[in-house]
Image (cartoon, rainbow, N blue to C red):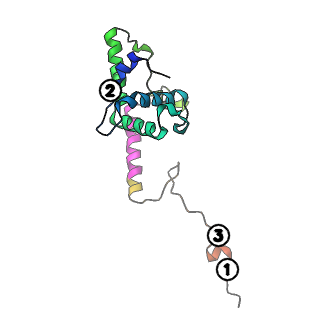
């Protein structure tokens, strides 16, 4: 994908030019390499030579990411669209993370006493755990260790038959 001159004029001020590079004439080429990488979904190593060395473009992307270039560019694009009156945020979705809950959790309402009792039980459980108390099962009974069969009386080795 090649950026047209109007697009590049908008993007260029957001990209920093340090004392040691990138050279301004390669800046556009490297940015287009980053765009190519994310449009195609290819690996950095598969990048065509026309964008420069893949490792240079990948490093440049990481530098821009770390200093917040892409966030600033997005904010600038939104501001420019708002200035033109072309913003429709009704269809914007930045993150589609989903948190799943059990179907029984839907519409659950707890009275204040139940909520207080649950909080108290959780606090008691945490206190018992921090003091090293024996773990309890769901019925509230202390769990007993299961014999491993290694003790003398269980394995039958305790008798001396000499």
For residue 75, side relative to residue 44 (left or right): left
The label shown at residue 149 is 3
* Mark 2 vs mark 1, CA separation in Å: 79 Å
Crowdedness of circle 3 by 10 Å Cα count: few (<14), some, many (20+)?
Answer: few
Where residue 118 sits, quadrant-wise, is top left
Tell me the element at label 3: loop
Span of residues in magenta:
110-126
* Mark 2 vs mark 3, CA separation in Å: 70 Å
Principal secondary structure, stretch drawn in magenta: helix
**In this orientation, does residue 100 appear?**
no
For residue 148, side relative to residue 7 (left or right): right
State the image coordinates of residue 50 (x, y, percent, origin top left): 50, 31
State the image coordinates of residue 93 (x, y, percent, origin top left): 45, 21
* Mark 1 vs mark 3, CA separation in Å: 11 Å
User: Which residue corresponds to mark 2?
Assistant: 14
- Residue toward you, 19 or 137: 19
Whether the residues at callouts 2 and 3 have beta carbons within 8 Å, the answer is no
Q: Residue at x 40, y 12 (%)?
A: 88
Q: Residue at x 34, y 9 (%)?
A: 84
112 in magenta: yes
Q: Which residue is drawn at 38% across and 35% down?
A: 65
Tell me the element at label 1: loop
Q: Most extreme residue toward the bottom, as rendered?
A: 162
User: Which residue corresponds to mark 1?
Assistant: 157
Whether the residues at callouts 1 and 3 have beta carbons within 8 Å, the answer is no
State the image coordinates of residue 154 (x, y, percent, origin top left): 65, 73
Q: Most extreme residue toward the right, as rendered?
A: 161
Quarter of the C terminus within the rendering: bottom right
State the image coordinates of residue 77 (x, y, percent, origin top left): 36, 19
Between discs 2 and 1, the one toward the N terminus:
2
Crowdedness of circle 1 by 10 Å Cα count: few (<14), some, many (20+)?
Answer: few
Q: Residue at x 56, y 63 (%)?
A: 145
């Amino acid at each position: 994908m090649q950026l047209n001159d109007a697009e590049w004029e908008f993007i260029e001020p957001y990209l920093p030019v340090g004392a040691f590079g990138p050279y301004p004439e390669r800046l556009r080429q490297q940015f287009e390499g980053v765009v190519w990488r994310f449009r195609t979904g290819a690996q950095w190593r598969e990048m065509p030579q026309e964008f420069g060395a893949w490792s240079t473009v990948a490093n440049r992307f990481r530098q821009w990411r770390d200093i917040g270039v892409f966030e600033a560019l997005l904010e600038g694009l939104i501001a420019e669209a708002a200035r033109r009156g072309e913003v429709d945020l009704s269809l914007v979705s930045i993150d589609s993370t989903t948190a799943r809950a059990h179907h029984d959790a839907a519409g659950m309402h707890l009275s204040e006493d139940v909520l207080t009792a649950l909080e108290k039980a959780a606090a008691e459980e945490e206190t018992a755990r921090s003091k090293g108390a024996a773990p309890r099962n769901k019925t509230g009974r202390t769990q007993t260790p299961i014999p491993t069969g290694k003790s003398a009386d269980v394995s039958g080795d305790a008798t001396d038959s000499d």
